[in-house]
Image (cartoon, rainbow, N blue to C red):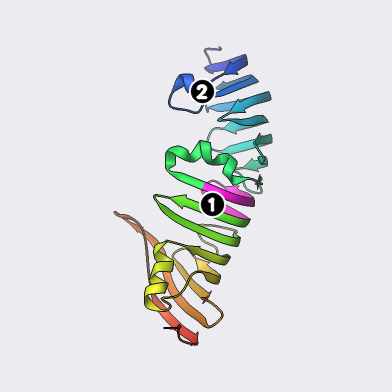
């Protein structure tokens, strides 16, 4: 510890750590070598290195590594990060916070069910597999991002409700989240479950509907002024399309979307009685 800059240094070996002893966490047995360096003055910074992390947590094998640095709120640098939990892996590399920076994050979640012990306190259960990529670029006060997600045999259970989709594809691109135009699209196939959206379609259009064969959604424009389109293939007989125009804004009650329906088309044959 150095008083002038309030600098600090920590080198520790963690052996057989059981998070359950420190709170309402799942049981585990985790070991790692940890190195922390930083200072509080004149501007705070932190450099963290975690090596040879291995063990078990909530019944799953765990291992990983980290070498990252935070230069206050001006720049985050990730030289290396990867974490494997069960059959799932996440990783990151790059930097974010200054003009020209790019931080890449990747997720290869081959077995979402392995995460259920971790998210059980949220009342959430998952199954299926998911791959995702996220790129963050630019400055903190003018961020940009590119994202893509692909999922197969996705199933979600929350608060007694179920949702499933045979496949999911999501993409989004926003060079400047504050000012520039953005593009986003979502595609779902074999979507079903007891969720309000599907229930509304059943009540209003197709009482015998068991699943939505395909959903395609797209958005273009800025957050506060954009156009959106939604197309549903309800089954082999019916298709629903709608177009919306509006914007997402904030007020004292939080985020609120306000807009109008600019187009609506329903085609196909009536539901069987």
Q: Position of residue 190 (x, y in %)?
A: 57, 66
Residue at coordinates 51% horizontally, 82% vertically from top-left? 238
> Where is residue 122 drawn, in percent x and y?
43, 41
Quadrant of the rendered image containing residue 62: top right
Note whether residue 196 is visible: yes
Q: In the rendered structure, find residue 142 and report the number of the disc placed on it.
A: 1
Label whose residue precedes the other's in the sequence (2 or 1) = 2
Q: Is residue 91 left or right of residue 194?
A: right
On-image quarter of the N terminus: top right
Furthest toward the front, the residue is 273
Q: Nearest to the eye among marks 2 and 1: give it.
A: 2
Q: Which residue is mark 2?
A: 19
Q: Which residues are magenta?
A: 126-149
- 246 or 122, nearer to the observer: 122
SS type, badge 1? strand
For the residues labelled 2 and 1, the Cα–Cα distance comes to 38 Å
Determine the residue positioned at 53% across, 83% down.
Answer: 237
Q: Classify residue 12 as left or right of residue 246.
A: right
């Amino acid at each position: 510890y150095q008083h002038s800059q309030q600098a600090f240094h920590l080198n520790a070996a963690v052996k057989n750590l059981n998070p359950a002893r420190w709170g309402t966490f799942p049981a585990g047995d985790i070991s790692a070598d940890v190195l922390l360096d930083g200072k509080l003055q004149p501007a705070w910074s932190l450099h963290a290195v975690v090596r040879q992390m291995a063990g078990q947590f909530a019944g799953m094998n765990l291992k990983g590594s980290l070498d990252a640095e935070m230069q206050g709120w001006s720049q985050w640098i990730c030289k290396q990060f990867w974490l494997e939990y069960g059959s799932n892996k996440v990783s990151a590399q790059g930097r974010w916070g200054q003009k020209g920076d790019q931080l890449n994050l990747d997720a290869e979640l081959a077995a979402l069910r392995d995460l259920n012990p971790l998210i059980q306190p949220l009342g959430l259960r998952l199954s299926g597999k998911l791959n995702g990529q996220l790129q963050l670029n630019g400055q903190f006060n003018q961020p940009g991002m590119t994202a893509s997600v692909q999922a197969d045999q996705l199933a979600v259970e929350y608060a007694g409700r179920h949702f499933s989709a045979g496949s999911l594809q999501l993409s989004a691109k926003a060079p400047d989240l504050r000012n520039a135009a953005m593009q986003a699209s979502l595609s779902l196939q074999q979507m079903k479950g007891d969720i309000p959206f599907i229930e509304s379609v059943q009540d209003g259009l197709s009482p015998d509907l068991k699943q939505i064969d395909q959903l395609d959604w797209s958005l273009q424009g800025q957050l506060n002024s954009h156009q959106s389109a939604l197309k549903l293939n309800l089954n082999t007989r019916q298709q629903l399309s709608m177009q919306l125009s509006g914007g997402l804004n904030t007020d004292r009650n939080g985020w609120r979307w306000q807009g109008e329906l600019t187009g609506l088309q329903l085609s196909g044959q009536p539901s069987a009685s």
